[in-house]
Image (cartoon, helix red, strand yellow):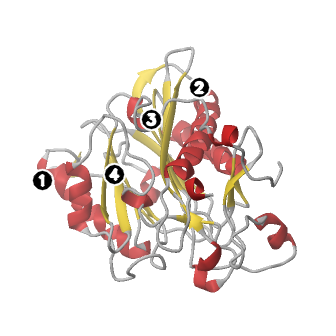
Amino acid sequence: MTDATTSPADREPLGLSGGLGRGGGITQVPGVQVGHAGDPVGITGCTVVLFPPEGAVAGVDVRGPAPGTRETDLLRPDSRVERIHAILLTGGSAFGLAAAAGVMAYLEEQGIGHYVGVARVPIVPAAVIFDLVVGDPQARPDAAMGYGACQAASGGPVAEGNVGAGTGATIGKLLGMGGMMKGGVGTASVVLESGVTVGALVVVNALGDVYHPELGTKLAGTRDPETGALLDTRAYVRRGVEPNPRAGLNTTLAVVATDARLDKAGAGRVASMAHNGLARTILPVHTMMDGDVVFAASTGDKEASPSTVGAAASQVVAAAIVRAVHAAESLPGIPALRDL
């Protein structure tokens, strides 16, 4: 890896389908829909990934030591519930988990959920990012916003950048708000030679810097609060520099979906391997100030091993992270990659 900034050629996203006009990213996986809802004034939002009515087999790997999550225990291989019906990624820190109630209400109206004899209970795992320091700290995703994200969901191209849970996402916060840059939502997908599709959707809200995983060049991250020049967060961390407490907490969230047939243990392994995509692009990652979470979901019955799907998942997660910082747009006092 180098710490050089990018040339124009370096700014091209990785050669995978994804995002606006490029195949739909995670929605290239049959049956997967994505919807965003947000508050551009309060600068927060949420993103929902919907699965077919019969649900998806899913797993999770939580590696950030400061996570905010919901229903992740149900994704353990030994838990009784076999399928989930949606995954919610949301801003608002722990307050944003309230948006899951809106997702559940929407799914219940559609007759979707785990049947318990007297009702259907939609299973909606969720995870949060911390964006309270960016906009209005009293503006938080709620049930109405979660419901709205479901209403907006489609299987078409996925909007990227400052949308949904990426509305208030930022990166490079080691030295505080004066040195951060804009993060956001990105998506990518790949079709393997076997015909199996693997897609990812990522919300990039990291403490560390974002690098191009193939070229090794830095795309965005911590800047000098005085000059605006890009700095090397890893070098500061190695010297024992502690994160500025005003920068708040961080977290990168990812959802991987595939039409390969996986059981819950296999989905968990895919989620684990997909974290390699974070490690290839975000440096440092999984710090004490991050709450990184990766979900993996299987919606189909095509043949592929968890190792094969996991290797592809690492690739599409890395690509989605790169796409997120390319698509991000600046906020007042918070520049984006396109501004450099």
Upstream in sequence: badge 1 or badge 4: 4
The residue that disc 4 covers is: 48
Q: Quadrant of residue 171?
A: bottom right
Pick whichever of labels 4 and 3 is earlier in the sequence: 3
Which residue occupies the foreground of this view, 130 or 306?
A: 130
Q: Position of residue 321 (x, y in %)?
A: 57, 48
**Which circle marks residue 118 in the picture?**
1
* Viewer-side residue, 201 vs 295: 201
Q: Which residue is mark 2?
A: 305
Q: Which mark is residue 25?
A: 3
| Residue depth check, mark 1 versus mark 4: number of the one nearer the observer | 4
Query: Which numbered disc flags the more N-terminal residue, 2 or 1?
Result: 1
Local secondary structure at mark 2: loop
Q: Which residue corresponds to the image point at 36% horizontal and 54% vertical from the top-left?
A: 47
Amino acid at dot 4? Val
Residue at x 59% of width, y 78% of height? 177
Instruction: Kindly indicate whether the residue at mark 3 contacts the one at mark 2 (C-beta within 8 angstroms).
Output: no
- For badge 3, the amino acid type reads Gly
Mark 1 to mark 3 CA distance (whole Å)? 37 Å
Which numbered mark, 1 or 3, is in the foreground of this view?
3
